[in-house]
Amino acid sequence: MSDLTLRDVLEFRPDPWHESARVWGRLAQGIDDAAEQLIRGSRDLVHVWPDGRASAAAVGKGEALRAEVSNAYNPARRVADVLEQHAYAMVGLRRQAEEIVASARLAGYQVDLVTGATAPPPSADMAGGLDRSSRATESVLQYLPTVVGYARAQDDATANAIAVNMPSPRVGFGSGRLGGVSRAVLEAQAGRSPAEVHAWWESLTPLQQEQVLRGFPDLVGQLDGIPISDRMWPIVRCWIANAV
């Protein structure tokens, strides 16, 4: 899972992500144009060269190439979209973190940008407790770990989407598959907030979610944050199987 720190969130810069998204967008458009040219140039081959083994081989190869080029467009487009979405999402989270940290520092708090830990100023101590201003600051600071948690979930989701859609030297675009989710990873979600669990669940691919539902229905049912329809589906599936 992502190990982004508060410092990483505060130092996030969207420009490289937007530029990468534009590059992938141009690649996707180029693939789309190439697919159209290939289709136009090869679709009548079967009519002008209808007979013989060589003809059949050429027609089959043309169909395979058309499918390969056409299928490459969507993964390239998805990579462009996910890079763009990541930039906007992280900018929003950075702004939230900046506001919280600025508010804390204005109140005299020390904020560790690596661990996210905070310490009130000595003047905040009143008879063993915090003064009213510091209590107000503390109520804002409680959201800082959540912001960092959302950033990590966003980082995981983006990495997941890129890994699935990146071209493989051996088999081309869009054919990569991420490994399964282990029981240990699922058990680790039990200590997270429902919002963090939901963000983690959304970062999984449909195949990974299906694997979790099939492999660990007992754990899924206990995790607040996973949609209720997914949490109930293993139970429904078992009922259907028994009914049949």
Image (spheres, rainbow, N blue to C red):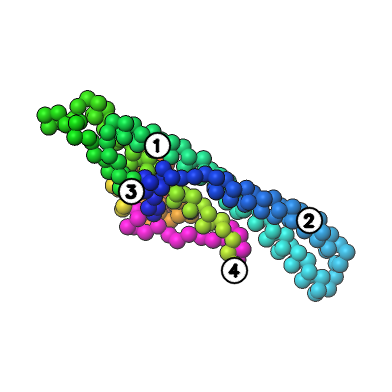
Q: Secondary structure at mark 1?
A: helix
Q: Which residues are magenta?
A: 171-186
Residue at x 28% of width, y 31% of height: 107
Please state which of the two labelled residues, at mark 2 or mark 1, is closer to the viewer: 1
Q: Earlier in the sequence, mark 1 or mark 4?
A: 1
Q: Residue furthest bottom?
A: 53
Residue at x 43%, y 59% (from the top left corner): 180
Identify the amino acid type marked 3. Val
Amino acid tagged 1: Glu
Q: Is residue 202 in view? A: no
Few, some or many residues within 10 Å of mark 3 (<14, 14–19, 20+): few
SS for dot 4: loop
**Mark 1 — residue?**
98
N-term-proximal mark, 1 vs 3 = 1
Residue furthest right as drawn: 48
Q: Earlier in the sequence, mark 3 or mark 2?
A: 2
